Structures are given as structure tokens and as C-alpha cells.
Image: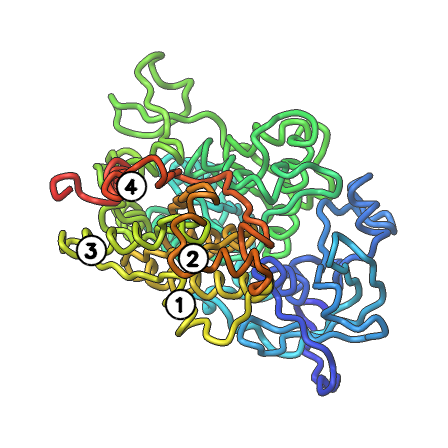
Amino acid sequence: MTAEAQADVSVDTAGLGTWTLDETQLGDLELLLSGAFAPLRGFMAAADVDAVGRFGRLANGTPWPIPVTLEVARDAVPADARHLVLADPEGAPLAVLEITERREHLPGLARLAGPVTGHREPEHGPFRRLMLSPARVRAELAGGPVLAFATRGPMSSRQIGQLRHMAGQLKARLLLLPLIAGPADVVTRPEALVRAVLAARASLPAGTLVVPVPLARRRAPGEPAGAGEDSAGAAGDRAGTAGAGAAVDRAGTGAGAAGAARELAAVTIVAATYGATHLMVDRAAARGADAGLQDGLPGARIPVLPSGDWAFDPRAEVWRPLSLIEAGTEQEDLSAGELGDLLDAGATIPDWFAPPAVVAELRRARPPRASRGFVLFLTGLSGSGKSTIARDLRDVLAERGDRRVSLLDGDLVRQLLSAGLTFSRADRDLNVARIGYVAAEIARHGGIAICAPIAPYAAARARVRNMVTEVGDFLLVHVATPVEVCEARDRKGLYAKARAGLISQFTGVSDPYEEPADADLVIDTSVVTRQEAVDAVLGLLTSGGWLSADLA
């Protein structure tokens, strides 16, 4: 199924199983159907995955840098199923997968392979009008050189200057490709990344085209976590405006360099299908993929041009090559960490960093912590004191009057939001997920959500953290009161009933509690007073900038 092919509606989807795609899978499907992943026609079989991991090419010898696979819950598809409907999160069928191979993957997961046939045009996501097909973009850019720049973060004045310079040398049109599958660097949300890139376009030559592309971060088979898809933080640590290769590991050797080279090669493939004849890669990405650039990128379709070392010349008040600036007077670009700290504090962004329109989008996407929504998630055993602390915090914040606050306590949620759920692990996870969903919506709109469930399982807490950090900040407080103290102060007699066998799957007695290793604050209410516990949380919020110190 290529970009030019018509969607085939002859396949009867009635009676077929359905799999709802996650964000990465949605992006991969769209790239497959649009032809951006040509020559792939579907999700890769084991032979191709193995060949890509070992040799950087498909089993038939075609150079190809990255695996494109589909993993589903093992029990989601019957073993004898031959077709599977692939749907968006709203349940709309987008394509049909012809299952030619099924293999057990990680525990509970199956990897399916086979060609995909489009059923309808995807409609999900902001800025859909800009997500043109490769064929349309090629037609728009036909007739001369095209310089592409792919980025997972907002663009700085340095990159804008480098693009203008390189496009002038090549006499090329510019094609900007915001990579919108997964969190964006600095601004988090993909729509914020697109807005920031559109703002930067105003400082680039007329005719510059912006086309968002749902290319997800990933790593090659056999590479450790961090060498590709899991290394978003590497980009954040290194350069907040780092471009395509910022998704790769910061290491320049071994698996990190291999992952960087493969990621960069994937970007060249996608850029080429959209009509690019050259790809400018930011200096951080070029350094990460040094070995690949020297030895030839596996599967690269177009030349990769490193942007070079530039800095801001304060005397001339322009960005220019470092070699043209008097030594010791140059000003380096802000790192993502530095930029994030300035935005979090509401501090001034230097004029030389980015055009005012870009800075305005950065501030809109990442407001100061004092006005940003966040979730305060207290977890601990029954009787640990988390509900008491949560209620007291709610009252204190209500008295201050400067922030909107909502309390989602465990018992209250069980009566309303999660009425009817049992205490099985699946239902407990669903209860925590429901709390997380509501809390994330509160944070999305600038409010504070205080949650106080037991939340005994680390995986469920991690899912809530992931939901929330897409729209705001997440702070985890472990109320680590020992079980003996919790049992001694138990007013409801729950521990006694659990030990007598009257209550099954009771956390701390007959069911485990997985202590958080990622808590922002740990409180033991057996050694601190109620007020001291509340003050400790308020101190965390104040020192981190989420609450104004003058009202504390």
C-alpha cells in the first residue's frame, strides 16, 4: 500500500477483531499507508527485523535502518485470525492488517506482521491540514533542490541562520519536518512543537513548507534502552533545539552511535519521500552519529549536511560560524535544561536565542510553574495518613486562594468514579487509571489535583505519571508509614478483617505494596506530626516554584 494507492474498502471489517493503536503505532501506520516508509507495505516479519538488527537491511537485501513492528496484547487476537482491523483511539477503523506471521514477543505480547490496506483517511491529531501526503509535497516542491530539516524541538535563531545560509548556498527551497510522534523536546506536546516551528518559519525564506510527520523515536533490535526511542531525555540534556538526531543516544560510540546513525537514516528516508534532496542535521545529531556519517548511513536516501559549529557574536549581534568570531567572545546556544529552567521560572529569554514569535510560543506551551497545572499524587498503605495530609493540603491551598485545587481521595473515588470495581489487581489498576485521567484533565486546564489512593503497583503509578506529564507536572509523595503503625491506628478494623481472612487481596497483608523508587518526597507519619507532614509537602511545592513563596 503506497501513498498513491487508493484505500481498499472491499475488505469486510464486520466480524473482524479490532486493535486500537497507540501513538507510535498510529504514526507507523500512517507512514506505511502514505508511502513514506516505502518499500515497506506493512509491519515487518521476524526475518526482516533480524536482518535490520544485524546488517541494517531487509531480508531481501534492501538497505533499511529501523524495525517497523506491531505488538499487541497476546489475547487480543485469536490464534487463527487472518485479518485484524487497526483503529484509532476513537474506534474508527483506519486499515486492515493481513496477518502473515504471529510470534510471541515479551510476556503477554504478540508481534504481528503482514501488509496493511487503508480503509479510511486518518483524522486524528491537531494540524491535520498540514499533514500532506508525500506525493502532494513532492508536487509542491518539484523543480529544484530541497533542503529539509527535521526536528523534535523548537528552533532557535542559530538553526534559522544556518538554514538560511545553507539554503542560499544550495539555491534550495526549505522543508521543515516537525517529528510529532511522542513527546516533543522542551514543549512536550506535538501541537506546541508545530506552533513553534510555524513561528520560526516567519524568519525563513518565502516558500518554506512545514509538514508535520509522525515518525516516532525508536531503537534498533538488540540495542539497549536509551539508544533510540527511550532517549528523549538525552536530547533534553544536550540541546533544547537539537533537531532530528536529538532523539538518539548522546554516546558517540558503540550502541549509541549505531542508534544515532539508524535514527538519522530513517529521517533521510522519510525526508526523501517528501521530496527533499538534502537534509541538514543539527550539530548535536551529527556528533551522535559520527560513525554513521563517516561510514555511510544504513539506508540513507539523500546527502546529510551537518550544520557546523556556530555561535552568537555579541559584537556583530548575529549568529555565525565559530571560526569567524573572536575567541572568548562567543555565546553558545541555550541547552534544553537551561531553556526549561528559564521557562519554568518565568524568567527572561535572551533576545539572541530565538525570534519573539518563537519565544511567545515557548511561553504559551510551557508557562511558569507558579501558574502551571500539576498533580500531587500521595501513595501509601491504608492508614498511612495520606488522606489526612491530602485534605489538609486542600484546605491550605483553598485558604491561599491563588490556585484552583481538586481532591481525589481514594475512598471518595471508590464511591463515585470507580463504583462497582473490585480489589483485584486489574480493577485496582483501572481505579488508579481513572484517577489519573481525571487528574490529568485538571492539570491540563491549569488546576491542581491532589490524589490519595493506595496505588500499590509501580506500573499503574507510572501510567498516571505518563498521562499527566503530557499536560502538566507530576509529583509523587510516598507516605511511608510502617504497616505496624498503620494497623495499630486502623479505625475501620480493615487489617483485623484481612488477617482473619474476611477481606482478600488487602494491601500490606495479603497483597503486596511496591514501594516507589521515584518519589519526590517520602514522609513517615509515625515520626512527624500532621502539621510537619503538610509543611514538608508545601516546602516541596514552594521550593520547586509551583507555589508562590510570598503566600506560603
User: Residue 550 falls in which quadrant of the image?
Assistant: top left
Question: Mark 3 belongs to which amino acid?
Answer: Asp
Question: Mark 2 belongs to which amino acid?
Answer: Pro
Q: Earlier in the sequence, mark 3 or mark 4?
A: 3
Q: In whole angstroms, how far apart are the C-alphas of marks 1 and 2?
A: 9 Å
Question: Mark 1 belongs to which amino acid?
Answer: Val
Q: In whole angstroms, how far apart are the C-alphas of marks 1 and 4?
A: 23 Å
Given residues 512 and 403, the one toward you in this image is: 512
User: Label 2: few (<14), some or many (≥20) within 10 Å?
Assistant: many
Given residues 269 and 12, the one toward you in this image is: 12
Q: According to the image, label 3 marks what residue?
A: 395
Q: Earlier in the sequence, mark 1 or mark 3?
A: 3
**The label number, if any, that marks residue 10 in the structure image:** none
Q: In whole angstroms, how far apart are the C-alphas of marks 3 and 4?
A: 14 Å
Residue plotted at (57% across, 27% down): 287
Q: According to the image, label 2 marks what residue?
A: 453
Q: Earlier in the sequence, mark 1 or mark 4?
A: 1
Q: According to the image, label 1 marks what residue?
A: 413
Q: Is residue 313 above or below residue 59?
A: above
Residue 338 relative to residue 249: left or right: left
Q: In whole angstroms, how far apart are the C-alphas of marks 4 and 2?
A: 17 Å
The x, y position of residue 79, in whole percent, is 83, 70
Q: Secondary structure at mark 4?
A: helix
Q: In whole angstroms, how far apart are the C-alphas of marks 1 and 3?
A: 18 Å
Q: According to the image, label 4 marks what residue?
A: 533
Q: Secondary structure at mark 2?
A: loop
Q: Earlier in the sequence, mark 3 or mark 2?
A: 3
Residue plotted at (70% across, 63% down): 72
Quadrant of the image containing the C terminus:
top left
Quadrant of the image containing the N terminus:
bottom right
Give the total number of marks visible in the rendering: 4
